[in-house]
Image: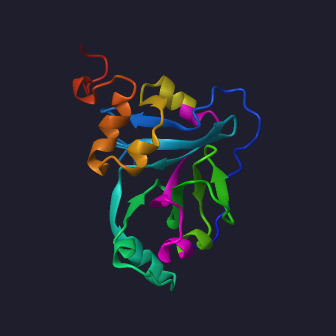
Amino acid sequence: MAATTLPDTMGMSTVESLSNHFLIAMPALADPNFHHTATLICKHNDGGALGIVINRPTDLQLGDILEHMEIEATRSDIARQAVYMGGPVQNDRGFVLHEPLGNWEATLKVTDDTGITSSRDILEAIALGAGPEKAFITLGYAGWGAGQLEQELAANAWLSGPSSTRIVFETPCEQRWEAAAALIGIDLNLISGDAGHA
């Protein structure tokens, strides 16, 4: 995992920030990158938004990535850790969503406790069993340009609501989309996929 500079979205914002919120795909959203997904928005301001899809597993395990990077996992359970597709942007690069925040070479702070890191040092620590207490490993991230996410929300492509690290790190993958919606009292099974029809 080469060190990757995540987009700088730290500036002042006049939009209502959805940082540290879930973005929940409406059932009718057909984009194959986001169909039935829940995405943790890591940063959102006037310049755009950056998030990590939390429920799109790949066929890869962490051991596959570590082997490619010539890092040796010290335990088989570490090597078997799932790897997710975090989004369509830079999906040849690894990102780790983790808690606690820690002190890594290239980390974008999401909250006081949670960050997303793109530098090799965090994977080396995880391989040794010395990484963050909770880690969610992805390839790629989801990105939106200035005003793009606001337009998609206005078009009813998404629901948004507060995030929960319990859903990210503990809820089974196949339940995360519906669990994220349930946080805001929405049962996605009751929403028609046909917009405009009762």
Q: Which residues are magenta?
A: 124-149
Q: Is residue 104 left or right of residue 74?
A: right
Q: Quadrant of residue 75?
A: bottom left
Q: How far across and down, in percent of the image, does residue 108 sit?
A: 65, 53
Image quadrant occupied by the N terminus: bottom right
Q: How far across and down, in percent of the image, does residue 52 sit?
A: 49, 50
Q: Quadrant of residue 73?
A: bottom left
Question: Which is nearer the eye, 152 or 171?
Answer: 171
Residue 129 is a magenta residue? yes
Q: Quadrant of residue 194?
A: top left
Q: How far across and down, in percent of the image, does residue 38 sit?
A: 40, 41
Q: Is residue 124 left or right of residue 198?
A: right
Q: How far across and down, in percent of the image, does residue 148 sit?
A: 57, 35
Vertical comparison of 148 with 1: above or below: above
Which residue is found at the position 22% from the left and 29% from the top?
189
Residue 41 is a magenta residue? no
Q: Is residue 6 visible?
A: no
Which residue is found at the position 44% from the left and 83% from the top?
67
Vertical comparison of 136 with 125: above or below: above
Question: Which is nearer the eye, 68 or 166?
Answer: 166
Q: How many marks on residues? A: 0
Which residue is found at the position 50% from the left and 77% from the top?
128
Check the image and name the residue furthest to the right.
12
Q: Is residue 64 visible?
A: yes
Image quadrant occupied by the C terminus: top left
Q: Is residue 69 left or right of residue 9?
A: left
